[in-house]
Amino acid sequence: MKQLCKAAGGLYLALLYLFVAGPLLFVIATSFNPATSFPAPFEGLTLSWYTAILARPEFLSGAGVSALVAALASALAVMVAFLAAYALSRPGGAGGRGAMATLLASPLLVPQVVLSLAMLQLASAWGVGTGFWGLVAAHAVYVMPFALRLVLTGLARFDFAVEEACRSLGGGWWATWREVTLPLLRPSLVAGFTFCFILSFVNLPLSLFLTSPSTATLPIVMFAYIESRIDPMIAAVASVIVLVAGLATILLDRYLHVRLVD
Amino acid sequence: MSGARGLNWFLLLPSLLLLAVLLGLPLAAMLAQSLQPNVLLSFTGPALDNYGYLLSRPYYLQVILRTLRHAALTTLISLPLGYIAAMLLRDLSGRAGNLAIMALTFPILAGPLTVALGWMALLADGGPFLGPLVRAGLIAPPRLLGSETGVIISLIQFVLPFTVLTLYTGLRQIQPQLQEAARSLGASGAARFLHVTLPLSLPSVLSASIIAFSLAASSFISPHYLGGAGQLTLTTLVSQFIMATFNAELAAAAAGLLLVLMLAAVVGITLAIGRFIRP
């Protein structure tokens, strides 16, 4: 009976994981299929769809824009999230931490399409174009709560007594941060940056109304491509993204030992 | 401790400024725009006519109801599915447990756009699952693409990792000694679940419901790619207003409605589940 329960539980989890990861695995499989329509029965193995990406400069420049936006937005998010998380975690701080943490997580409740529209309409109310910085702003405010969550997790395991030790040895607050606090928190800061970077890099709806041809992010380029036609090349682009996301997942878990739940 | 308190405010200032300038200000501009007249409606603004227009046309009411139905169904289906998974994952230990949790963050990081591509292929009538069945004449073409079922399948898949992770965190915080105590008092497995595990896990059920509902209601990619123009939700309606009919004021009103509905849903869910949470 117990064996049976265990087997049923295992089967349930296997099916759930297949449901959750199946579409991604299928996209990867499709990217190696030489058939020109999508979806199509498998006809063999080819890497030609990957080389076809190289012939389309908009995908490469899109990846470049995405990487730059993601890097700037994540850096800004991690910096402000670190300061906030530090204030919310240090001993002797004020009450109302729960309320403050909830307030700082509020961007999560705003739909990304709405944030994109709001940023567009603020720019038009001011009579300026949204441009590159509007894009960075929308991405930064969206990823900030994720950085906050990861840095708070790191600070929960941080012993503030080591700061006292440093200060009692004559270190100023800046020296204490530079020599003690920041190095000890580096795994959560790097994890926060990595996580935010990926979330921003793959995000379509945040950029929806904010890009121009010169600031089109990779998901926007994919969006435009899919509007006109859909073929295995777009699956190859998606597979590259999945590969990067997979590497980041492993990096977060193995090297930094940080994850979303603990 | 007033110095420490002052320092705290100083440290919180950048994040609060970020929220005010990059979230509060844009939303205020959007709401202001939603009160302005436009090419379809002339009125002396600011007034609520755009909202009235959306709420009085059966077509737009359907869009609103569809958005709420998608979110409600996704929440109701993904919660029990995720709860069972979280309970099973809690019993996994060591390496297997770590791997299982890591595998759940993977689709989140890969992003909904890549996943939607997979669904567009998998749910197509000529796709790998349905194609052979249709060609063999076993089933009529189910036409899942462009249907509500297709959208909801992909929404559940998108939301499930978040639900499972949230419930898993909550379940792990319940002390195993409580189970032991209930067992030693003669409680059966079902009684232990009903009187110990379930009540103690309710706070995480509450957060998982809010997360699932908000993610589903605010999803753009699933309704856009799997529902299409015949299955508009408020998010895809906003993009139509901006990119196809160029009506920024109605777009702002539709976005404002979505925000209000989501806030109302969060309050409603909190009241509904919160009643059962013992302080």
Image: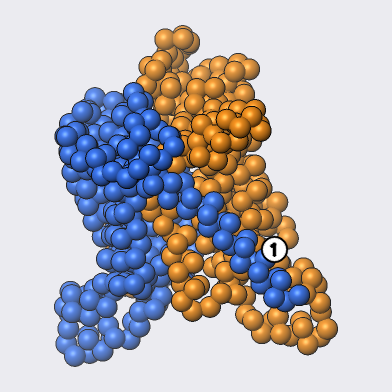
Chain colours: A blue, B orange
Tell me residue B136's x, y (percent).
61, 32
Task: Answer with left or right where residue A88 lies relative to residue A9.
Answer: left
Looking at the image, which residue is at 64% across and 81% down? B176
Q: How many labels does the image show?
A: 1
In the rendered image, the vertical position of residue B173 relative to residue B12, given as above or below? below
Place residue A103 in its image quadrant.
Answer: bottom left
Image quarter of the C terminus of chain B? bottom right
Tell me residue B263's x, y (percent).
56, 42
Tell me residue B197's x, y (percent).
70, 71
Task: Answer with left or right where residue B165 lies relative to residue A254.
Answer: right
Q: State the residue in front, B139 or A95.
A: B139
Residue bearing mark 1: B277
Q: State the residue in front, A4 or A118.
A: A4
Q: Can residue A23 be seen in this view?
A: yes
SS class, disc 1: loop
Q: State the residue in front, A27 or B154.
A: A27
Instruction: Tell me the subunit letter for badge 1.
Output: B
Looking at the image, which residue is at 35% across and 79% down? A158
Place residue A49 in its image quadrant.
Answer: top left
Q: Can residue B13 be seen in this view?
A: no
Tell me residue B19's x, y (percent).
36, 48
Q: Label 1 amino acid? A: Ile
Q: State the residue in front, A173 or A156.
A: A156
- Determine crowd level at label 1: few under 14, some 14-19, many 20+ residues with C-alpha closer than 10 A: few
Looking at the image, which residue is at 25% across and 44% down? A47
Task: Answer with left or right where residue B167 lies relative to residue A240.
Answer: right
Looking at the image, which residue is at 54% across and 27% down? B146
